[in-house]
Image (cartoon, helix red, strand yellow):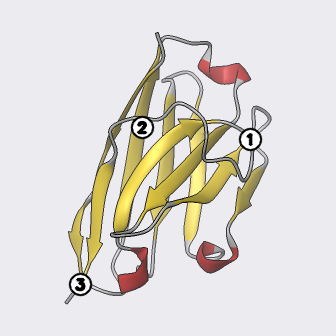
Amino acid sequence: EVQLVESGGGLVQPGGSLRLSCAASGFVFRIYAMNWVRQAPGKGLEWVSNIDNRGLTRYIDSVKGRFTISRDNAKNALYLQMNSLKPEDTAVYYCALGGAGSTLGSRGQGTQVTVSS
């Protein structure tokens, strides 16, 4: 059974940073592409970033240069380093299986990120 557990969210001021983590189990993590997706209040799921099984990364335009996705296959872990956070980044963030642009893959319970002064 696929299990994804996100952590690291919280309340941060605009311009601040957070590092999200995702612990994966129940599947062969190293062979799968992984996504971070988010859901802002009152909105649908939005794809944010992808890393494939070779380490190639992709980002939605609004986070390019601010967010960095990474993975540690030895630890079955996925990360999202978020810098220069903006109020519009406020959302529940999920890690999920899947290719770039997809919001349909299995995902965890999410971690809340709130950017506010």
- Give the mark nearest the N terminus, 3 or 1: 1
Q: In the picture provided, is 107 more to the left or to the right than 47? A: left
Label total for image: 3
- Give the mark nearest the N terminus, 3 or 2: 2
Q: Quadrant of the C terminus?
A: bottom left
Q: Which residue is mark 2?
A: 22
Q: Is residue 67 above or below residue 53?
A: below
Answer with the quarter of the image where residue 92 lies: bottom left
The amino acid sitting under disc 1 is Gly
Q: Is residue 9 above or below residue 14?
A: above
The amino acid sitting under disc 2 is Cys
Q: CA distance from mark 3 to mark 1?
A: 31 Å
Residue 116: give its label.
3
Q: Position of residue 105 (x, y in %)?
A: 60, 34
Q: CA distance from mark 3 to mark 2?
A: 24 Å
Closer to the camera in the image, 87 or 104: 104
- Give the mark nearest the N terminus, 2 or 1: 2
The amino acid sitting under disc 3 is Ser
Residue 53: give its label.
none
Q: In the picture provided, is 70 more to the left or to the right than 109? A: right
Look at 43% across and 68% down and name the residue there.
43
Look at 74% across and 41% down and name the residue there.
99
Q: CA distance from mark 2 to mark 1?
A: 17 Å
Whether residue 86 is visible, yes or no, is no
Q: Secondary structure at mark 1?
A: loop
Q: Tag 2: Cα neighbours inside 10 Å, few (<14), some, or many (≥20)?
A: many
Q: In the picture provided, is 103 more to the left or to the right than 33? A: left
Q: Which residue is mark 1?
A: 99
Q: Is residue 49 above or below residue 91?
A: above
Q: Position of residue 70 (x, y in %)?
A: 59, 47
